[in-house]
Image (cartoon, helix red, strand yellow):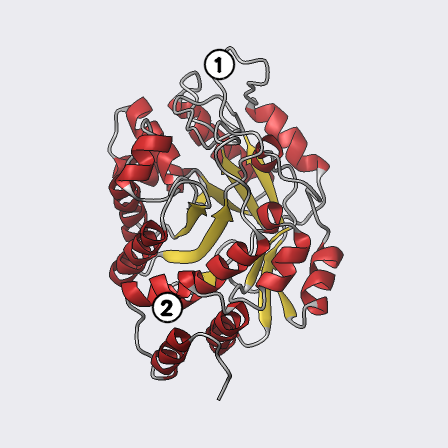
Amino acid sequence: MPLFLDKNLKNIHEKIRNNLRLSFEDGLNLLKTQDLLGLGYLASLVKENLHSKKVYYVFNQHVNYSNICLNLCKFCAFGKPPEHPDAYELDIEEIIKKLKKNPSPVREIHIVGGLNPRLPYEYYLDLLKTIKKEFPLAQIKAFTCVEIEHLARLAQKSIEEVLKDLKSAGLSCLPGGGAEVFSERIRKKLCPEKISGKRWLEIARTAHKLGIPTNATMLYGHLETYEERIEHLIALRQLQDETKGFLCFIPLPFLPQKSYLKREVAPTTGFEDLKMMAVARLMLDNIPHIKAYWVFLGLKLAQVALHFGADDLHGTVYEEKISDFSGAEGDKALSRKEIERLIREAGFEPVERDALYRPV
């Protein structure tokens, strides 16, 4: 029997041993605990029951096609108005040139950007078609639920019609961005122009029903409460019960360094980041994968997160720009050799995957 410093963890351990779902109150107790090692033990137990010693990664390249954005959320340092000196948009030819400069064979091309009112609907379809033609073996993970809503407005089509168009053009799955925290209170304060949490879930549900799997995220460590974090996780869990369409959950620590909140909010600590990783693994009992997104966490903390419930270290991440604008420090791309070394040194078995978590 493990030694827990927090008696609440003893009760939660019993639930886990008996395959019982954790409650809202359990989630709050997990977030409030100071027994980090006890919490890590529980998350590692669940993770290894699901994946043994396997840790997944993907050989991937990012495309941030434009940072021009209508929403200009207060927590975001990436989005810029059109007249800003740092605003940019890439044409399709530029994107293909950038992709061809990086190592191959790429397994996943990850595409996200701002809500740019100047790019027509056809740009997005042509982008997918061109990438699919140039990189036929790569899967395209593209456009958050927020971007899908933007495309529907551009084209004056339904969400279902837009997703069908994108799928025909080469889309394999959606990334999980734009979820932030579903709390209406938080969204009114930080991103009033963005779609609601309810709408984000509706779009994800539609994608799942069309056979398009998605990821899911939560941006934590700004103005949200612990209660709002757990409500967010339970909302994802409920949708997953219904659709089985989520592949992975990614907890994203807020990087305030270059945002409008830099004077109000301090960066999250390693203690909080590891705690959030573990709580995600324990609460999301029906989402198969939890990702330690090393671009935001840093390589060293991401390694430790593999002992706190994470079973995915994302990937090689060529050409990612959002973290640069947000103030993230450290490496911006990894080789296959480097990422496998990180996984092995942490005591796990590296497994290269594709965008749908199929081993390659």
- Residue in the foreground of this view, choosing between 283 and 213: 283
- The residue that disc 1 covers is 82
Indicate the position of residue 185 as horizontal and vertical percent values. 28, 38
Q: Is residue 199 left or right of residue 132?
A: left
Mark 1 and mark 2 in contact (Cβ < 8 Å)? no
Whether 138 is drawn above or below 276: the answer is: above
Q: Earlier in the sequence, mark 2 or mark 1?
A: 1
State the image coordinates of residue 27 (x, y, percent, origin top left). Answer: 35, 64
> From the viewer's perspective, is residue 203 above or below residue 30?
above
Picture quadrant where residue 121 is located: top left
Residue 263 rendering spot, x and y as whole percentages: 52, 30
Give the label on residue 285, or none. 2
Q: Residue at x 66, y 41 (%)?
A: 318
Write the residue at 51% across / 53% down: 355
- Closer to us: 130 or 338: 338
- Circle 1 SS class: loop
Q: Residue at x 59, y 37 (%)?
A: 323
Q: Where, by quadrant of the figure, is residue 152 drawn? A: top left
Q: Looking at the rendered structure, which numbered label has been put on residue 291? A: none
Q: Is residue 259 visible?
A: yes
Q: Quadrant of the C terminus?
A: bottom right
Q: Position of residue 40 (x, y in %)?
A: 52, 70
Instruction: Give neighbour class at mark 2: few <14, some 14-19, many 20+ (Cα, 10 Å).
Output: many
- Looking at the rendered structure, the secondary structure element under dot 2 is loop
Callout 2, which amino acid? Asp
* 16 left or right of 269 in image: left
> Label 1 sits on what residue type?
Pro
Task: Say if 141 sits above or below 289 in the image.
Answer: above
In the image, taking residue 188 as reference, residue 81 lies left or right, namely right
* Figure disc tally: 2
Rate crowding at label 1 as few (under 14), some (14 to 19) or many (20 or more) other CA atoms within 10 Å: some
